[in-house]
Structure formats: C-alpha cells, structure tokens
Amino acid sequence: MIKSISKIAYPALSLLFLAACQSTAQTALNNPQKITGLKTPESVVQAKDGRIFVSEIGEFGKNGDGQISVIGLDGKISVFASGLDDPKGLAIIGENLYVTDNTKVLKIGSDGKSSLFVAADKFPQTPIFLNDIEADTQGNLYVSDSGDIMGKGGGAAIYKISPDATVKLLINDQQDARIKAPNGLLADDTGNFLLEVDFTSGILYSLNTQTGQLSDIAEGFGGGDGIVHHSNGNMYVSDWKNGKVFSVNTKGDVTLLKDGYKASADIAITKDEKYLLVPDMKAGELDFISLQ
C-alpha cells in the first residue's frame, strides 16, 4: 500500500537547507567514476566544501580496523580517521563529523581526531546496533538502533541527541511493534517529523517526534537502508538486501531507479543534487547515480 506523501506535513527537509549552499559548494569529483577497493563501505556524506566522507567498517565485529576515508576535490581518496570499530552512519554539523560506532556515537574534528560524544551508558536503554545518524538545522542528532538485527529481533529504538549530548528516546519496539529494525533517517528543519525506513519490514514511516505518532508512507523497500531528499520533492531509498535504489515522488509512487548492487547501503546526495552516492557494502565500492 502506498500513501500520498503530500498528506504528511513535511515541507522543509534539512537537505533543502543544504541545497542553499549550492552556489559555493561543488561536487567532489568532476565526471565522477565509481570508487573501488573500499573496506565494507556503509555510509557516505558530502561536506559543504565538496569533500566526500565514507565510513568503512572493515571486518564486522573486529575492533580498531574501521575508518573514515575522504575523497578530495581531485578525486583522490585518503584515510581521514582510523582506529574505529564498526563505523556506520555519518552526519555533519559545522566542522564536526558524527559517526555511529557500534553502541556509541563519536565526534571527529576537522583534524581527523575522534572523541567520544555519547557513550553506551548515556542511552535510556542499552544500545545494540546503532546504525544511521541524521542532523537537523538546530544541531540535534537522530540515531537509529536497529536492535538485534542479526538475531531474533528486539531492542530497536530511535533517539534524539541534543547539542549538549543529552539523549532522549523517541520511540522503541515496546511502544510500537512496527519499530522492528529502524535504519535510515531523514529529519525536517523543525525536528517535528522524522522519516525512517525499516530494515526488517521495508516500510517507510513518518514519525511525529512530538506526539510519537507513527504513519506509514510507502512500502516494498526490502532491507530499507538509506533515505535522502531532493529539492524537487523526490526522495530516494536504498534496499540493502536486494541491492536496489528506489525513487519516491511527492504522491508516494515508488519507482526502481537502479539495481544490480550487492548491498546498497546508506546513500547520500551531492550538494549540487546532480548525483546520488551509493555505497555498495559487499562490493567495496562507491557508485554515483546521475540525477540529471
């Protein structure tokens, strides 16, 4: 079942704010080519200066072999931060890069040095599998905990983290059984609404962060992973399990954009909105889908 997105009050997503920087930000690559040789890439984000950051998990469950790589304006890739465990979601606020790393959230400065921003014991319930991370224009972060995603399920939750690192539970699987394994997140400018796509059910939801009301928007995304928004109103959602990327228009119509990936993970959109960035986790690649 597909529901019209226009029925949800979702006028000003955070990426619209970022798109206002298009006149000063360039894509990190001219005529970008697929990046290969990455070590289990999970998430990607582009900074205002055009650089592209990629989280590389390395070997799952092996501490210390994870890293954040950066693709410069010349298209060359280098290590930006190393010594992480299993880094996943990425978000940028100001000059800092925020990363979910297993059961904690790290802050990485412009010098590539990481520090602990939120420890596991600061969450209202013990984190299991912190996954995506999203920022709003007020400097708040939103983090999904996919829970026991590799086992029998349980422990799934979505949190809000204020600029002073205070963590608030927004919703969990005990409050609403539809929260099975929340993954990709997308916040509006006010922080009153949060889109999330579920890895287990493949359903795209809208969460009212003030009331806790959860509304389904669209479905059929398999292992829903990443979600981004274009200023023309379209959204894009990746399906990790089936190696696909979909587009969703303002009416909620879902269209296959590209398939053939081994595991399309947490996607991003370039600041000029010309390309969709797709980490293919199992292939060790970063792909560029033209949106022109």
Image (spheres, rainbow, N blue to C red):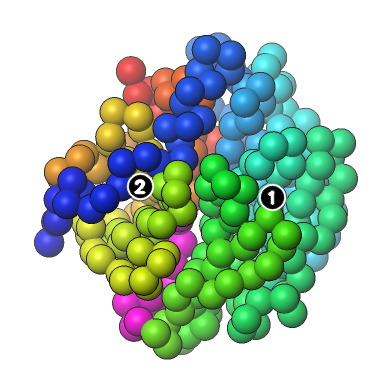
The range drawn in magenta is 176-185
The foreground one among 249 and 255 is: 249
- Circles 2, 1 touching at the beta carbon (< 8 Å): no
The foreground one among 151 and 108 is: 108
Which SS class for mark 1?
strand
Residue 113: x %, y % from top left: 87, 45
The foreground one among 27 and 212 is: 212
Q: Which of the two discs, 2 and 1, sits closer to the camera?
A: 1
Residue 38 in sight: no
Residue 120 in sight: yes
Residue 260: x %, y % from top left: 36, 42
> Taking 121 as reference, is 135 left or right?
left
Which residue is at a point 47% across and 85% down the rendered structure image?
154
Mark identifier at residue 110:
none
Identity, as a three-letter code, of the amino acid under mark 2: Val
Residue 187: x %, y % from top left: 44, 50
Is 241 above or below relative to 120?
Answer: above
Which residue is at a point 58% across and 72% down the rendered structure image?
168
Q: Quadrant of the N terminus?
A: bottom left
**Does the magenta-highlighted stretch encompass residue 182?**
yes
Is 157 above or below relative to 16?
Answer: below
Which SS class for mark 2?
strand
**Does the magenta-highlighted stretch encompass residue 161?**
no
> Taking 143 as reference, is 276 left or right?
left
Q: Earlier in the sequence, mark 2 or mark 1?
A: 1
To which residue does mark 1 refer? 98
Identity, as a three-letter code, of the amino acid under mark 1: Tyr
To which residue does mark 2 refer? 237
Which residue is at a point 61% across and 83% down the rendered structure image?
125
Which residue is at a point 64% across and 41% down the rendered structure image?
92
